Image: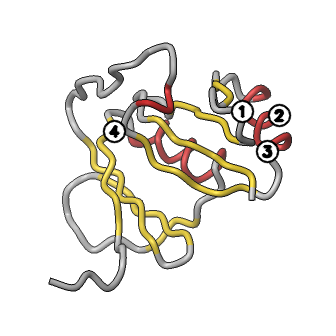
Amino acid sequence: LQLTQFLHAAIAVTDLEKAEHFYGDILGLKKIDRILKFPGAWYEINHVQIHLIVSDSISSNVHNAEKWGRNQHLAFSVANLEAAKEVFTRHNYPFQMSASGRAALFVKDPDGNIIELGET
């Protein structure tokens, strides 16, 4: 077995409109064409796709409520962490700074999926 490329991650969401606002408008991911018929949306960054899949309900994957980074999450690099903090604050998305002291933060999408942003 030889893996050659990471293709996509699928994220369950309950409200596609809110999720599209978060992933498209807040995070700034590029929306791409989607070929499947069930409800959802696809985004892409550097040839890796994020697939939003609509679900009636989502059970929480948060096992450590105090330190969001110790839960399942997706991670992205960001050029300016301070600018990201300002965006999340302005749009009322709570976030946690990394407990490790790294230049990174963790934010939850409208369904509680955790996203890490680390400054590069």
Q: Of the two numbered discs 1 and 4 on the same chain, state the one appearing first in sequence.
A: 4
Alpha carbons under labels 1 and 3: distance apart: 13 Å
Q: Nearer the viewer, mark 1 or mark 3?
A: 1
> SS for tag 4?
strand
Q: Position of residue 62 (x, y in %)?
A: 35, 23
Alpha carbons under labels 3 and 4: distance apart: 25 Å
Q: Which residue is mark 3?
A: 81
Other residues around mark 2 within 10 Å, as few (<14) / some (14–19) / many (≥20)? few
Other residues around mark 3 within 10 Å, as few (<14) / some (14–19) / many (≥20)? some
Three-letter amino acid code of the residue under disc 3? Leu
> SS for tag 1?
loop
Other residues around mark 1 within 10 Å, as few (<14) / some (14–19) / many (≥20)? few
Q: Of the two numbered discs 4 and 2 on the same chain, state the one appearing first in sequence.
A: 4
* The one of 119 and 53 positioned closer to us in this rendering: 119
Extreme residue toward the top, this view? 66
103 in relation to 80, above or below: above
Examine the image and state in which quarter residue 113 appears. top left
Three-letter amino acid code of the residue under disc 2? Glu
* Residue at horizontal 75 percent and vertical 59 percent from the top: 120
Quadrant housing the N terminus: bottom left
The label shown at residue 101 is 1
Answer whether labels 3 and 2 touch (C-beta < 8 Å). no
Q: Of the two numbered discs 3 and 2 on the same chain, state the one appearing first in sequence.
A: 3
Three-letter amino acid code of the residue under disc 4? Val
Q: Which residue is mark 2?
A: 86
Other residues around mark 4 within 10 Å, as few (<14) / some (14–19) / many (≥20)? many
